[in-house]
Image (tube, rainbow, N blue to C red):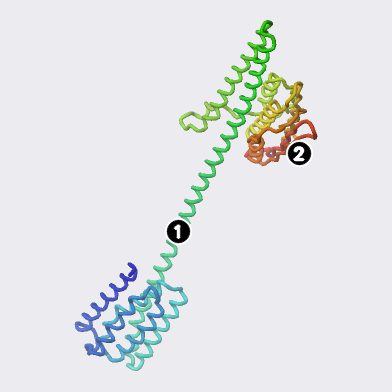
């Protein structure tokens, strides 16, 4: 037996005891005889199923209560069971069902009392007031429960939405940091590898005629690359800390850093032709353009595969957007395993609402083209 069913059984038993006390203590009408006690106790039994099938319980109890009153037994005895039944019908049903049941019960009561004259009609109106009161109480509690359940559901939905939004932002931030780290480390490690190869080539080419200046320059370039990477790595990782003031975190890289990228690629042996606009662009767009050029130059140096590699970098504004084009005449990626460079570039472009195309140029060369929308004047960057 479930807890709800057990509660209904205990309520029915308690009301039956109360009705028995009322039947022999006070109220109008005569004391029940054997038939009266049978009717009085029997009409309380269906209350054990009042919440499971309220209309069925109503249909069973009304004939028993009407018969009890018709024999002029104590009219106050079944009042408790009647009120609980009406309350249950109202609290578990719709407004239409409650109105229909209330009208039916009051109409039946008037039909039974109309034969008693004006005294019966007056008593019927008094009982009708109790009937209406119980139905209104049950309807009010039903509406209150529905409103409470709706409010709780909305609160839970809002909490889930906040949690999902927080998880989404955490995921986006992790993805952004992963892209920054990939661009930074791939670029720096590639340049260190190239410059190390230069130093090793100088040492192995002719040890007796060692070009100390060339070796020293290659090592200085490696040290400078390490320092630059360390500083940018620190700036990138500071977003994971909350104890540093915002003004101590380095600014986002932008178009102003493209000449340094070009100079670094030239030191690695590539011929870089750079064209950058003088106009300022929003920080998010500038950072996306910087990272795209950085990744494209890194891939060109890494996969160019020949001396005299030429890379053309063009950045210009047209039709309300910033166009970034990086083209090289190298050998392409060849059989190198796929990495996250192109994936990261596409994610950066999507973050500012742009588009990216990348692919080989025929049998030789590779091109990366991005279109980054610029906000309208006075609109501001997203």
In the image, residue 128 above or below residue 288: below
Which quadrant would the N terminus be assigned to in this image? Answer: bottom left
Q: What residue is drawn where x is 38% and y is 81%? A: 58
Furthest residue to the left? 25
Check disc 1 and report its element: helix, strand or loop: helix
Q: What residue is drawn where x is 46% and y is 61%? A: 150
Q: Give coordinates of residue 324: x percent, y percent.
A: 72, 33
Between 216 and 8, the residue placed more toward the observer is 216
Name the residue tied to disc 1: 151
**How crowded is the residue under tag 2: few (<14 C-alpha within 10 Å), some, or many (20+)?**
few
Check disc 2 and report its element: helix, strand or loop: loop
Name the residue tied to disc 2: 319
Q: What residue is drawn where x is 48% and y is 29%? A: 244
Q: Is residue 354 left or right of residue 136?
A: right
Mark 1 or 2, nearer chain start: 1
- Splitting the image into 4 quarters, where does residue 152 fall? bottom left
Q: Give coordinates of residue 330: x percent, y percent.
A: 75, 28
Q: Are marks 1 and 2 in contact (CB under 8 Å)?
A: no
**How crowded is the residue under tag 1: few (<14 C-alpha within 10 Å), some, or many (20+)?**
few
């Amino acid at each position: 037996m479930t807890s709800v069913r057990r509660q209904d059984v205990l309520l029915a038993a308690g009301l039956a005891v109360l009705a028995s006390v009322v039947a022999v203590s006070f109220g109008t009408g005569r004391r029940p005889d054997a038939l009266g006690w049978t009717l009085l106790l029997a009409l309380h039994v269906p209350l054990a199923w009042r919440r499971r099938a309220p209309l069925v319980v109503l249909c069973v109890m009304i004939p028993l209560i009407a018969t009890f009153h018709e024999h002029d037994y104590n009219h106050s005895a079944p009042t408790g069971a009647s009120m609980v039944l009406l309350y249950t019908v109202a609290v578990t049903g719709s407004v239409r069902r409650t109105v229909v049941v209330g009208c039916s019960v009051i109409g039946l009561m008037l039909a039974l009392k109309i034969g008693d004259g004006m005294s019966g009609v007056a008593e019927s109106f008094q009982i009708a007031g109790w009937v209406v009161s119980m139905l209104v109480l049950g309807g009010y509690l039903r509406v209150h429960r529905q409103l409470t359940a709706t409010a709780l559901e909305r609160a839970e939905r809002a909490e889930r939405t906040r949690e999902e939004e927080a998880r989404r932002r955490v995921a986006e931030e992790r993805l952004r940091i992963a892209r920054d780290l990939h661009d930074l480390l791939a670029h720096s490690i590639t340049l260190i590898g190239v410059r190390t190869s230069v130093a090793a080539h100088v040492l192995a080419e002719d040890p007796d005629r060692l070009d100390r200046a060339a070796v020293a320059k290659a090592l200085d370039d490696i040290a400078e690359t390490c320092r630059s990477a360390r500083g940018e790595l620190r700036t990138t990782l500071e977003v994971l800390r909350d104890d540093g003031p915002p003004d101590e975190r380095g600014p986002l890289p932008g178009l102003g850093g493209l000449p340094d990228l070009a100079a670094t690629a030239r030191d690695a042996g590539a011929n870089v032709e750079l064209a950058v606009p003088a106009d300022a662009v929003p920080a998010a767009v500038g950072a996306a353009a910087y990272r795209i050029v950085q990744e494209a130059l890194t891939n060109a140096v890494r996969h160019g595969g020949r001396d005299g590699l030429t890379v053309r970098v063009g950045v210009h504004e047209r039709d309300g957007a910033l166009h970034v084009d990086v083209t090289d005449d190298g050998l392409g990626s060849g059989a190198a395993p796929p990495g996250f460079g192109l994936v990261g570039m596409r994610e950066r472009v999507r973050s500012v609402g742009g588009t990216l195309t990348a692919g080989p140029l025929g049998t030789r060369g590779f091109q990366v083209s991005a279109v980054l929308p610029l906000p309208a004047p006075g609109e501001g960057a997203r």
